[in-house]
Image: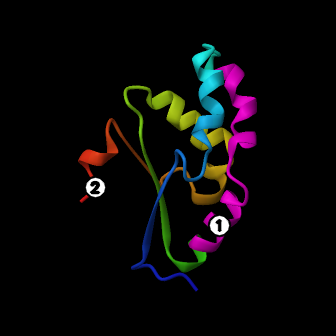
Amino acid sequence: MSNKKTVFLVDLDNTLIDTEKLRPLVDKGLSIQKLKKYFKQCLFPESLQVLEKLKKLGKVIIFSSHHGNLNYQLTKFKESGIEKVVGNKNILFFDDKHLHIK
């Protein structure tokens, strides 16, 4: 049973997605369209299953910094399968997330 008062903030990069695995592809200058096929491969093992379990305990919000490239972050969120698990309204992307967390 979900506790509506419990909220889990889960970072996208280096928590759910192995960003270091993606970095060489991004550094090569591959377009977002070409990168799409790699996002699911770069999920940490059992990331989606953990999100499913957290959803049973409360609300799950995915947050991340986009550093001026919101489209890239949104594509990672969608193409990795995370959006299907948490929904498309449960995301918070900031230019710099550290400025918004207390």
In the rendered image, residue 70, in percent from the top left (x then y), is placed at: 44, 31
Going 52% across and 48% down the picture, which residue do you hit? 12
Q: Is residue 34 magenta?
A: yes
**In screen coordinates, is 51 left or right of 60?**
right
Query: Which amino acid, by three-letter code, is at mark 1?
Result: Val
In the rendered image, residue 27, in percent from the top left (x then y), is placed at: 58, 18
Tell me the colour scheme of the image: rainbow
- Helix, strand or loop status at disc 2: loop
Q: Which mark is residue 19?
A: none
Going 59% across and 34% down the picture, which residue do you hit? 75
Q: Which residues are magenta?
A: 33-54
How crowded is the residue under tag 1: few (<14 C-alpha within 10 Å), some, or many (20+)?
A: few
- Residue 69's place in the image compared with 82, above or below, is above
Reading the image, the residue beneath label 1 is 50
Asked where in the image residue 45 lies, by quadrant, the reply is: bottom right
Going 58% across and 43% down the picture, which residue do you hit? 77
Q: Is residue 37 magenta?
A: yes
In the rendered image, residue 56, in percent from the top left (x then y), is placed at: 60, 77
Q: Main secondary structure of the magenta part?
A: helix
In the rendered image, residue 42, in percent from the top left (x then y), is placed at: 69, 41
Reading the image, the residue beneath label 2 is 101
**In screen coordinates, is 100 left or right of 36?**
left
**In screen coordinates, is 86 left or right of 71?**
right
**In screen coordinates, is 88 left or right of 18?**
left
Q: Marks 1/2: CA distance?
A: 22 Å
Q: Quadrant of the C terminus?
A: bottom left
Label 1 or label 2, whichever comes before in sequence order: 1
